[in-house]
Image: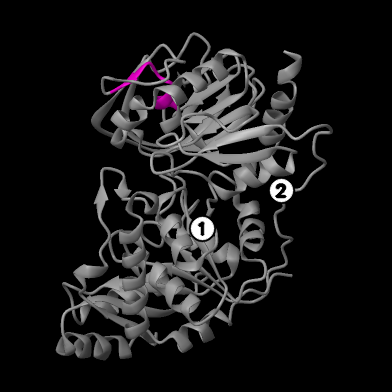
């Protein structure tokens, strides 16, 4: 049984202040000495970075589309083990989920799977009495979703607050917090959302501290903790990456990190380690060589387009990556990793492993995908079905090699990505917890490298 007190922080719509409130709550409770487990509904990589900074623990995603509804509670239990409180930041509006698929992957669905009370963050900047109708509608829409209270965000003045509280007195839901307009707690954003923590360093620390101070000053933390404790025990066993590792020496799997490659799910490294790998992180912006003994390479997502000149200037590392790929070593590259392996990005030379050119685009490609592996690779056997998501403003030409990585079935049918030698490179982000066999397969191929 999982008995961690928990809250889901939701909102009627995007840009209501969920990230500010959720991160602020995490920071405020952590400042009280509590072990706070941070979670994010959906596939987003950036918000969990701020969560991690606020709590000192890995930010973890709960995505019912990519991982399936059956894994949501076990993944939550895995991440929150031993904690005093878990805070789950929602995605979009409370009832918004995967396009055309009802409640699937919505914050509301995750709240129900976790049996967690919801705190509704309302942007009150352009309303007064109407807030009661809004809150009533959200609270009554799905009786299985338990909204336990409201936090009013962007409140202008004492009089504005009084009007809002009077209106909500009739709703039966308590006001658990009032946060005034505060530009200083805003976090900078660009074409794919907030700027990741790894790129902001001390600025990010200051922003998280400011969020915590504002939330601590404006919210009733005792009432919020009491609400969190009303969540019943979950009968789910925690997810675990442990399975019988491949016998033999532990191959070194190098994982790209640093400011250019910030997109990663914590479970991937855990699965690689559980399969028998020694996972070593390196920074392609700073390190001129791969970790000693590298037998496999994982290059996840991020913002290489923001660092193309610096990545290009690191010629020693580019050569090392190219030599490793040409040797047949397993290389798994997602999105930013795909661009890094291309011949060039916005005119700047990259690794040249793939005969393709990448450039920035005005068009945002965003959404969930259903995919099937087109051919065998160290990551997946042909025919392997996985769910994932795309999230980029770049274009790769050609989009697929002679041996593509994936056949896409949603929203349109197409092939995408590259499989050549040991390389599997694609725009598709996947969550390996849903298919842990890919990590084991990857490590098996790493261990077999000396034989090749």
Vertical order, 327 against 43 (above or below): above
**Quarter where residue 434 is shown:** top right
State whether residue 406 appears in this view: no
Residue at disc 1, secondary structure: loop
Using a 10 Å C-alpha cutoff, classify the residue at mark 1 as few (fewer than 14 neighbours), some (14 to 19) or many (20 or more).
Answer: many
Q: How many marks?
A: 2
Pick whichever, 390 or 169, lies toward us.
390
Identify whether 21 is placed above or below 378: below
- Residue visible at 56% across and 13% down in the picture: 326
Q: Is residue 304 left or right of residue 63?
A: left
Place of residue 452 in the rendered image (x, y in percent of width and height, measured from the top left): 72, 13
Q: Tell which circle, 2 or 1, labels the residue nearer the N-terminal end.
A: 1
Q: Whole-percent x and y of residue 251?
A: 71, 32
Its colouring scheme is: one colour
- Residue 442, position in %: x, y? 67, 29
Residue stretch in magenta = 338-345
Q: In this orientation, which residue lies closer to the viewer: 163 or 133?
A: 163
Measuring from the top left, give residue 48's x and y in whole percent.
45, 56
Residue beneath the point at 27% across and 88% down = 165
- Residue 355 placement: quadrant: top left
Q: Which residue is tagged 1?
A: 59
Can you say whether 352 is above or below 133 in the image? above
Local secondary structure at mark 2: loop
């Amino acid at each position: 049984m999982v008995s961690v007190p928990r809250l889901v922080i939701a909102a009627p719509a995007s840009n209501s202040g969920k990230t500010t409130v959720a991160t602020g709550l995490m920071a405020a409770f952590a400042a009280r000495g509590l072990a706070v487990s941070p979670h994010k509904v959906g596939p987003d990589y950036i918000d969990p970075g701020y969560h991690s900074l606020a709590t000192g623990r890995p930010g973890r995603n709960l995505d019912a589309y990519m991982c399936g509804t059956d894994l949501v509670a076990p993944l939550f239990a895995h991440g929150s083990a031993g904690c005093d409180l878990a805070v789950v930041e929602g995605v979009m509006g409370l009832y918004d989920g995967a396009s055309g698929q009802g409640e699937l992957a919505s914050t509301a669905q995750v709240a129900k799977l976790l049996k967690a009370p919801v705190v509704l963050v309302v942007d009150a900047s352009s309303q007064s009495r109407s807030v009661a109708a809004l809150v009533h509608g959200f609270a009554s829409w799905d009786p299985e979703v338990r909204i336990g209270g409201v936090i009013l965000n962007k409140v202008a003045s004492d009089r504005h607050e009084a009007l809002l509280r009077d209106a909500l007195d009739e709703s039966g839901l308590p006001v658990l917090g009032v946060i005034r307009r505060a530009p200083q707690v805003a976090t900078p954003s660009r074409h794919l959302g907030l700027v990741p923590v790894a790129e902001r360093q001390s600025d990010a620390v200051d922003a998280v501290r400011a969020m915590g101070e504002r939330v601590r000053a404006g919210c009733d933390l005792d009432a919020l903790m009491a609400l969190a404790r009303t969540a019943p025990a979950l009968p789910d066993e925690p997810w675990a990456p442990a399975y019988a590792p491949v016998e033999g020496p532990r191959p070194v799997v190098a994982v790209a990190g640093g400011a250019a490659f910030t997109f990663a799910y914590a479970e991937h490294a855990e699965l690689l380690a559980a399969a028998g790998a020694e996972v070593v992180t390196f920074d392609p912006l700073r390190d001129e060589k791969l970790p000693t003994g590298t037998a496999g390479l994982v290059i996840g997502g991020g913002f290489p387009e923001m660092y193309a000149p610096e990545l290009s200037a690191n010629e020693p590392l580019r050569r090392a990556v190219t030599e490793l790929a040409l040797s047949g070593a397993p290389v798994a590259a997602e999105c930013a990793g795909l661009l890094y392996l291309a011949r060039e990005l916005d005119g700047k030379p990259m690794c040249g492993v793939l005969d393709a050119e990448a450039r920035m685009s005005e068009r945002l490609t965003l959404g969930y995908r259903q995919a099937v592996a087109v051919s065998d690779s160290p990551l997946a056997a042909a025919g392997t079905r996985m769910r994932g998501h795309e999230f980029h403003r770049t274009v790769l030409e050609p989009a697929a090699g002679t041996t593509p990585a994936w056949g896409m079935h949603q929203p349109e049918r197409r092939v995408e990505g590259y499989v050549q030698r040991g390389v599997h490179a694609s725009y598709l982000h996947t969550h390996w917890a849903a298919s842990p066999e890919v990590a084991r397969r990857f490590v098996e191929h790493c261990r077999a490298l000396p034989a090749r």
